[in-house]
Image (spheres, rainbow, N blue to C red):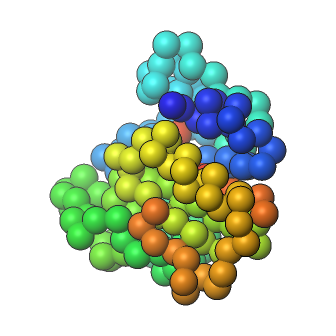
Amino acid sequence: MGLNALYTKFGQDLPILAVPCNQFGYQEPGKPQEILNGIRYVRPGNNYLPAASISFFGKSNVNGDQAMPIYDFLKTACPPTSIVIGDPSILFYSPIKTTDITWNFEKFLISRTGQPLYRFHPSVEFDVIIPFIQQALNQTIPSVAAICSTPSKFILYISMSILVLYHM
């Protein structure tokens, strides 16, 4: 299941925000105006067009001294998805921390009230996240301390080299 299918399933109940990032192996080297063409023709390619309702932001940093404040907040609120950050020779930021986003397509699920609920490793596919979204949409969520784990209206943030908060 891809982003478009996720949007089709949840519609306006799940705003999806995508933030391109070039800190992981320089996987998003293009200029801002080139990012959507990269998605369309390269990764995932095959003439893929993201749903018009998926909000794409400008290329930003998600780790290091220049990280967007929202990512600093999310990384503090949710435990890391892995104890291994990665090969520092292909991570283009400093300093490297244990709470860092490990690679493109790490995902955060955030409540209607802005509370981070879950953080998902980049390798976790969207179909695995669906039960977490459904559970969150069908109940009142308690305090942040009791919630955020390494999995109202919700935002999926994805950090990308291209946010649910989806980081690409």
Against 130, residue 114 (above or below) is below
| One can see residue 106 in this view | yes
Could you say which is closer to the camera, residue 65 or residue 118? 118
Q: Relative to the observer, which residue lies in front, 41 or 105? A: 105
Query: What residue is rendered at 40% in x and 63% in y?
Result: 101
- Image spot of residue 146 (x, y percent): 54, 83
State how many labels appear. Answer: 0
**Quarter of the view holding residue 84:** bottom left
Q: Looking at the picture, does residue 90 appear above or below residue 81?
A: above
124 vs 50, left or right, is left
**Residue 35 visible, this orientation:** no
Q: Is residue 5 left or right of residue 93?
A: right
Image position, residue 110 (x, y; %): 64, 65
The percent coordinates of residue 154 (x first, y second) are: 71, 58
For this rendering, which residue is in front, 90 or 75? 75
Name which residue lies at 49% across and 39% down: 127
Q: Nearer the viewer, residue 54 or 20?
A: 54
Q: Is residue 86 above or below residue 21?
A: below
Residue at 76% from the left image edge and 31% from the top image edge? 52
Give the residue at x 65% y 61%. Answer: 136
Quarter of the rendering containing residue 95: bottom left
